[in-house]
Image (cartoon, helix red, strand yellow):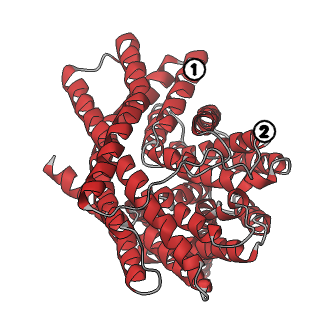
Amino acid sequence: MKKVLLEKLKESGLAVLPIGVIILILHFTAAPLQGGTLAMMFVGMFMLFAGLTLFSIGVELALMPIGQHVGSALISSRKLPLIFIVLFIFGFVVTVAEPDLSLLANQVASIPNTTLIIGISVGVGLFLLLAVVRILFHWPLGRVLAVIYPLAFIIAIFSSEYIAVAIDAAAVTTGPVTVPFLLAIGGGFAAVSNSRNAEDDNFGISSICSVGPIITVLILGMFHNSADTSYLPQQNTVVTSFQQLLKLFGHGLQETFIDVIIIILPIVIIFLIFQIIKLKLSHSELIKIAIGLAYLLVGLTIFLAGVNKGFMPAATALGEEIGNLSYNWIVIPLAFAIGACALLAEPTAYVLAKQVVNITNGAIPRRIMLFGMATGVGIAMSLAMVRILTGISIWWILLPGYAMSLSLTFLVPSIFVGIGFDAGEVATGAMSAAFVLPFAIGVGSSVPGINIISESFGIVGLATMLPPIVVQTIGLIYSRKLKKAKRIADESVKYNAEKTEAE
C-alpha cells in the first residue's frame, strides 16, 4: 500500500506542479492575480493534489477491479441482452461520476448542468455497447472510427455553434474515472474472447466511447441558444482574509461531499446487485473494493471542491489578465508550453510510450514518442488560442486534422490505430478541465464580441486530435522500416541460396 501511495503522490505532483509553476511565474511577471485569487489558487492546487492522489488510489482499488470482474462475467454469460443492459448502465454511471465532466458542465453557460451530464453519459453508455460489439465481432477499429466520426461531423452541420463544446466533452469525459473502467471492461472482454486479435481489442474502447458525447452534445445544442448565459454559476473570486478563505473552501467541501455521494451511490448499488446475482466475490476482495470506494469518495470530494472554489477561478482570472494585455499574442507560445508540460506530466503517456517501444522491439524510442506527442498537444493548444484571438472557425482545423487521422487508419497496422486514438484521450488529463479550459474561457472573455460557447471552447478537444496523427505516423514509418528490413532479409536469403547452388 505504501508503494501505491508513493506512486500516486508522484503522479499527482507531476500533474499539478508544472501548471502551478507557470501560474506563479505569470503572476509575478505579466498577469498579477488580484483579490486573494493567488491564495485561492494555492489552496485549490493543494486540494487538487491531495484529492487526485486519494482518488487515483480509489480507482485502482475499486473501479478497475469492478470493471474487470464485470467484463469477464458478462462475456462468459453469452447473454447479449444482459451484456448490453448492464454495460449501458455501468457506462452511464461511471461517466456521471467523472469529475472532469462536472467541471466542464459548470462552464457551459447555455445548457443546464444536469441536462448536459445526463446527455453525455447516455452517449458514453450507448457507444460503449458499440465498442463491445466491435470486440465480439472483431471489427477493425479503423473502419468503425471511419464511420462514426463522419456521422458526428454531419450532425455538427445542424449544430455548428456547439462543435467546440462537443469535442471538449469527448476529451474530458474520458478522464480518470471513465478510462480505467473502460480499459478494465475491454481487458475483461478481450481476455476471454479467444481471439487472435485480443491485443488489438485492448485498445480503442475509449476512442469509440468518446464519439458518443460529441453526438449527444450536438443534439442538445439544437435545443439551446449558445448565447444564453443563464446557467453560468456565479463564482465568488474575491477573498480578503484567511477566515473568508477557510469559509469558502469549507462550504465547498460540504456541497461537494453530498454531490459525490449521489454520484458514487449508483455504482455501489449496481455492483452489489451484480455481486449477489453473478460475481460472488470473496470477503477479502469486497473489503478491498470497499476501502477503494472510501478513497474514491474522499478524494473526489477534495478534488472537486479545490478545483471549483480555487483553481478554476484562478485559471479564468489569469486568462482574462493575459487576454487584456496589449501583447496578448503571448498566449500562443504560452499555450504551447502548457500543452507540452501537461502531456509530459501525464503518467499514462509514459505507459503508452513504453507499449510502443515493446511493440516495435525498440525501433521507436520512448523519447521520440513523448517528444512527438508533447509537440502535437502544444501545437493544438496554440492553434486554439490563435482561433480565439482571430475568430477562425474551428472547422478549418478539425476537418483537415481528422481527415488525416482517419486516412492513416487504412495505412498502418491495426495496433497503432488503437494506441493512437487512445493516446488522444491520454493527452487530456486532470489539468484539462481544471485549468486549460477555464484559462481559454478567460482569454476569450477579454476579446470583444466573442461567443464563448463557439470560440473559447475546443482547446481540450483539439489536444486530443494531434496524438492519433503522431502515433499513427510513427506506426507508418515503423511498418515501412519493417517491410524494408524483410525485403533485404529475403534478398539476402535468395542470394545465399543462389550462391550455394552455384557452388
Closer-to-camera residue (496/458): 458
Report the residue marked by disc 2.
223
Q: Residue at x 37, y 73 (%)?
A: 18
Badge 1: how crowded within 10 Å, few (<14), some, or many (20+)?
A: some
Assign a secondary structure to mark 2.
loop
Q: Given this view, does label 2 or label 1 mark the residue nearer the observer?
A: 2
Mark number displayed over residue 270: none
Mark 2 vs mark 1: which is more N-terminal? 1
Q: Is residue 396 left or right of 174 when viewed as pictured?
A: right
- Amino acid marked by disc 2: Phe
Up-down relation of residue 3 to residue 499 (above or below) = above
Up-down relation of residue 313 to residue 29 (above or below) = above
Up-down relation of residue 250 to residue 324 (above or below) = above
x and y, in percent, of residue 37 in the image: 39, 67
Mark number displayed over residue 85: 1
- Amino acid marked by disc 1: Ile
x and y, in percent, of residue 450 in the image: 73, 66
Badge 2: how crowded within 10 Å, few (<14), some, or many (20+)?
A: few
